[in-house]
Image: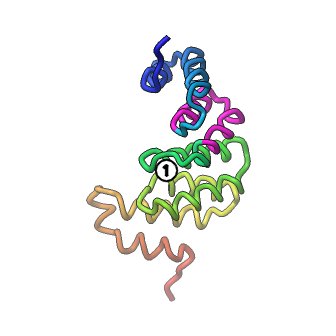
Amino acid sequence: MNINLEQAIQLRSDKAFESAEEMFTKLIALDDANPRLYYHLAWLYDTMEREQEAIPYYEKAIALNLPIDEIADCFLGLGSTYRAIGEYEKSKMVFENAIRQFPERHDLKVFYAIVLYNLRNGKEAISTLLKIIAQTSSDININRYKNSILKYADDLDMIYE
């Protein structure tokens, strides 16, 4: 049987999860040093809501130096998986590491804000989200108040006297 990564990814997209899992497993058996295979199998397990099974595959993909065009998404998957199972500190560490490496990736910061909320750090979570909104919104009214939003994001408790 001639199998390849693109076919396995398509099976995942088509929600043929069991076939995709079988194909990813076979591919890993043939090429166990390919980080993309581990990443996409982890993604499959996340899609199947089998988060505990996804974690070692995300970690293996990272350890094997997943290509730069997929590593940020892998960090997002791992961080959000840790968050989904209640491992908030691990999630926070993954997102902080990812944000250091990919500061332009606002999606990482949004998921980071979610875990900050879970860690009962609502102030930093809101601040993070306000900054993203101010920096990325194309809404004319948000843009009109961009400077004020950014100012409040830095000090949510600001009171003028």
Q: Residue furthest left?
A: 140
* Label 1 sits on residue: 72
Image-based side of 5 in relation to 58, left or right: left
- The residue lying at 70 percent from left, 54 percent from top is 90
Q: Which residue lies furthest to the top in this view?
A: 1
- The residue lying at 49 percent from left, 71 percent from top is 153
Q: In which quarter of the image is residue 19?
A: top right
- The residue lying at 67 percent from left, 30 percent from top is 50
- The kind of residue tagged 1 is Ala
Q: Residue 95, image x and y in percent?
A: 58, 56
Magenta residues, dominant SS class? helix
Residue 38 among those drawn in magenta: yes
In the image, which residues are magenta? 36-60
Image-based side of 155 in relation to 94, left or right: left
Q: Quadrant of residue 29?
A: top right
Camera-nearest residue between 14 and 148: 14
Q: Residue 75, image x and y in percent?
A: 56, 49
Camera-nearest residue between 139 and 11: 11
Image-based side of 137 in relation to 157, left or right: left
